[in-house]
Image (cartoon, rainbow, N blue to C red):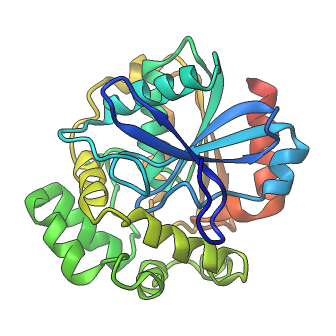
């Protein structure tokens, strides 16, 4: 366990292949365990209202994915490798069953966990999560910044690392990256990003995501452009999708596509919300209450 600056205490577990997974915890240390799959690029530093998390008796565990933050890079990583990593981390922490939440780029990883760990995942929620890039309307309404990334991911994945280095490097200037990343988002998202609590959290998280360089971020983007490796119709854990109608980062069409194909799923569309609605205290309370009640 270690502490760095004003970052929250972080811990590590050693996985079966010798890699280190880093994670942070928020909320009630003795509460019901919920794993949070962070976005891209992001890290263990981004989390919703911790007071609400604690009040609802939830222990929110936020691991860095391989190559992000302080988690070791994993060569040749695929989407379906992640559930095994989380299962091993849960074993190390003495956790048998748990719920899972994914935001933005954490959405595909949450679906993968619901598919691969049906006997351990008690409930799943996806907040503004991404879907398969070949879904109809997948790029509709995206900001220009994300459209470029989408095009590279689907048409020229070998160029992603270089493009990140030249034009979108959070390691070089995380504050400038935050400004570029939020450009073109819905006004409600811009306001949330500029909040005096959220702005430094995101800036620190972008820098932390690129602590080891850009390989982990580039790998995530390449994974999103590949086949997920399993049929959505065979996901046995129902997923509750929450999505903002004003989301210009991951278009609502992605959530509708996934909800239509995963058996037993629900879709809650939020008409006045954008991409970062989970940072709203009241909304996070609704999401977490629903997840805990179903788990």
| Quarter where residue 14 is shown | top left
Vertical position of residue 10 compared to residue 32: above or below: below
Res 267 visible? yes
Q: Residue furthest top?
A: 119
**Residue 35 or residue 66, whichever sits in front:** 66
The residue that appears at 71% across and 81% down in the rendered structure is 195
Q: Name the spot of residue 148 as percent of width and height, x first.
A: 24, 73
The residue that appears at 49% across and 50% down in the rendered structure is 129
Q: Name the spot of residue 75 as percent of width and height, x first.
A: 19, 41
Residue 191 is left or right of residue 167, and the answer is: right
Q: Name the spot of residue 176 as percent of width and height, x first.
A: 43, 88
Q: Name the spot of residue 147 as percent of width and height, x first.
A: 29, 71
Count of all numbered marks drawn on residues in the image: 0
Residue 32 is left or right of residue 198, and the answer is: right
**Residue 96 or residue 48, whichever sits in front:** 96
Res 261 visible? no
Pick the quarter of the image with the C terminus: top right
Q: Residue furthest right?
A: 55
The residue that appears at 65% across and 57% down in the rendered structure is 47
Residue 114 is left or right of residue 223, and the answer is: right
Vertical position of residue 84 compared to residue 167: above or below: above
**Residue 215 or residue 102, whichever sits in front:** 215
């Amino acid at each position: 366990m270690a502490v760095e600056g004003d970052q929250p205490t972080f811990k590590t577990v050693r996985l079966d292949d010798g890699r280190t997974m880093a994670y942070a915890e928020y909320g009630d240390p003795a509460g019901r365990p919920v794993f949070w799959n962070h976005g891209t690029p992001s890290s263990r530093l981004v989390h919703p209202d911790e007071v609400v998390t604690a009040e609802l008796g939830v222990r929110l565990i936020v691991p860095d994915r391989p190559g992000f933050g302080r988690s070791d890079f994993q060569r040749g990583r695929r989407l379906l490798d992640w559930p095994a990593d989380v299962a091993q981390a849960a074993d190390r922490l003495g956790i048998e069953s748990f719920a899972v939440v994914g935001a933005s780029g954490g959405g595909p990883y949450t679906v993968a966990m619901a598919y691969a760990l049906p006997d351990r995942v008690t409930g799943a929620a996806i907040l503004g999560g991404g879907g398969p890039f070949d879904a109809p309307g997948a790029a509709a309404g995206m900001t220009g910044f994300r459209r470029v990334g989408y095009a590279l991911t689907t048409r020229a994945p070998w160029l992603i690392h270089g493009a990140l280095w030249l034009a979108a490097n959070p390691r070089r200037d995380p504050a400038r990256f935050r400004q570029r990343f939020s450009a073109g988002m819905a006004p409600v998202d811009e306001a949330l990003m500029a909040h005096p609590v959220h702005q430094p959290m995101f800036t620190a998280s972008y820098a932390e995501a690129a602590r080891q360089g850009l390989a982990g971020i580039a790998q995530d983007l390449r994974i999103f452009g590949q086949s997920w490796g399993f049929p959505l119709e065979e996901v046995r854990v129902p997923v509750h999708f929450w999505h903002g109608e004003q989301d210009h980062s991951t278009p609502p069409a992605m959530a509708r596509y996934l909800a239509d194909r995963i058996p037993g799923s629900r879709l809650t569309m939020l008409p006045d919300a954008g991409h970062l609605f989970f940072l709203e205290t009241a909304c996070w309370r609704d999401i977490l209450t629903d997840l805990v009640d179903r788990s």
